[in-house]
Amino acid sequence: MTVTAAPVRFDRDLADMFRQASADQNPLHIDEQYARGTAFGEPVVYGVLGALVALSGLDPQPARRLTSVSVRFPAPILFDRDYQRDVVEDSWGRAVVRLTDGPQTLLQVTATFGAGSAEDVVHGGADVPVRTEARRTDFADFAAGQQIPVAYAPRWAVLAKLLDELALPARGVGLAEAATLTGLSYLAGMEAPGSASLLAQVEATFEPGAVTSFRVEARVRAVHEQLRMLELDGTVTGAGIVATTTVKVFHRPDASTPDPRRLSDALPGDRPLAGRAALVIGASRGLGAAITQALALSGADVYAGYQHSHDEIRALVAALGPDGELVHPISGDAADPRWCAAAVDQINAGGRTLDHLVLNACPVPSKMALAPGSTHRTVEFVSRALALVHAPLAACAADITRSGGSVLTISTAWVTEPKRGWSGYVVAKKAVEGLITAAAEEYPGIRWLLARPDRLRTAFNATPMAAGLGAPVEPVAAALVAALGTGQQAGTIRVVGS
């Protein structure tokens, strides 16, 4: 088997052209703030765009035309990463292309071709009104046999421009076939399931057709509850083709938000931290949000450090009711020493001293094998993770020593039980733990707590396969905050699990 390899990198301009052409406005692909609240932590490249880019790596074959295509999406494709496109097979009648990240396959396209010209259709018809916002659905909204109404046509002129950009007609992929694929992207991303969509597989078989008006029809063939997956089948007609289609799409679960009532039930009722001041780095989501709320419910004034999640921090404060007045959001980059110094100055205003520092912030990790090409990204990740701990710790350690307070650092159980493919994340957390060990020698007046929680129900684990797995954050957050008020000896490091 001969494999032809070439580097591939996805930029935002190409994705924006696909967005316009497909009318797929799914927020996972275009909304930075929305994507930060998902397991991916950043926007994900459209799967169908990945398939088109994969097919653009084939040799030009003007005398052939796509007759079927099957695309699998084993892992997400992210922007501004260096990937590889492997053309595994490219005969006249069949092609197999993979996009890979080291040893990991992100996408695989299998295509068959027949005689014809992909340039036969130069325009597919009129544009039609489409959704401008993806449907928000629950998984329970779907049942086998359900018809999915779809009003759709691509933006034909932009789609033709995208095909020319990728030189796809010369490789057997014409406007009609591409419109079918964009229609499937729109079907999953905007209709079923809509905003919660995560493509697993798309398939289409193409035959000539005389219908000119473009139409997408779909129904739910099966619902797989354990996988949170929908199977959709249907047809796409128009632009000179009739396509029989299948889509397998996950319904991504929403990341759970902390429940102040559950936190309150798990905390002592005498507000043991009243009058104390705490700074939480990474306060807006997940365990950091739960710790922030638990501190406020324990009576502490909480300075909540976050960078982008404005909506989440407002919701966190509102959920606390009157205790929300104890939370003081501070927006900025905690890896910047200037921001850290300003945060300390804000806390010290009025003569108060910082009592507790919670170091929870970490870049969103992604699975990345220890393989050639991963070094730069791993080093960047480790450096960023370490900076998010080092900068605030350097700025706050002297204050916390004066108050005889505590530093709580969030690590992971994976430092002792690493998971395959997560070496960058494990190295980052081990580096953070090494920093805490050294800092305890320099600042023996501080009580040091090191948390190694196992899997929790946070955005990091808000994936279809992990839905419902992991421990709730409230008991873990309550236990960690309670530990801040215990009589631990200064200069010691206490390791706390889940």
Image (cartoon, helix red, strand yellow):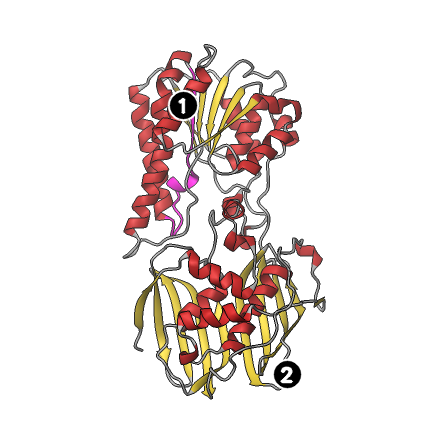
Report helix, strand or loop for mark 2.
loop
**Screen quadrant of the N terminus:** bottom left
In the current view of this chain or complex, which residue is farthest to the bottom? 115
Range drawn in magenta: 405-422
Q: Is residue 209 left or right of residue 497?
A: right
Q: Is residue 145 left or right of residue 408?
A: right
The residue indicated by pointer 2 is 211
Q: x, y percentage for residue 430? A: 34, 37
Q: Is residue 309 magenta?
A: no
Mark 2 Cα shell of 10 Å, populated few (<14), some (14-19), many (≥20): few
Q: Amino acid at mark 1?
A: Ala
Q: Earlier in the sequence, mark 1 or mark 2?
A: 2
Q: Amino acid at mark 2?
A: Val
Can residue 273 be seen here? The reply is yes
Corner quadrant of residue 267 = top right
Q: Is residue 365 left or right of residue 144?
A: left
Query: For the point 52% across and 70% down, which residue is it?
Result: 157
Mark 1 Cα shell of 10 Å, populated few (<14), some (14-19), many (≥20): few
Would you say the residues marked 1 and 2 are in contact, meaning their CB atoms lie under 8 Å apart?
no
Of residues 495 and 53, which is closer to you in this image?
53
Q: Is residue 409 magenta?
A: yes
Report helix, strand or loop for mark 1.
helix
The numbered disc on residue 278 is: none
Disc 1 to disc 2, how far (Cα)? 66 Å
Q: x, y percentage for residue 19? A: 52, 61
The residue indicated by pointer 1 is 342
Query: For the point 36% across and 23% down, which residue is it?
Result: 395
Can residue 192 be seen here? The reply is no
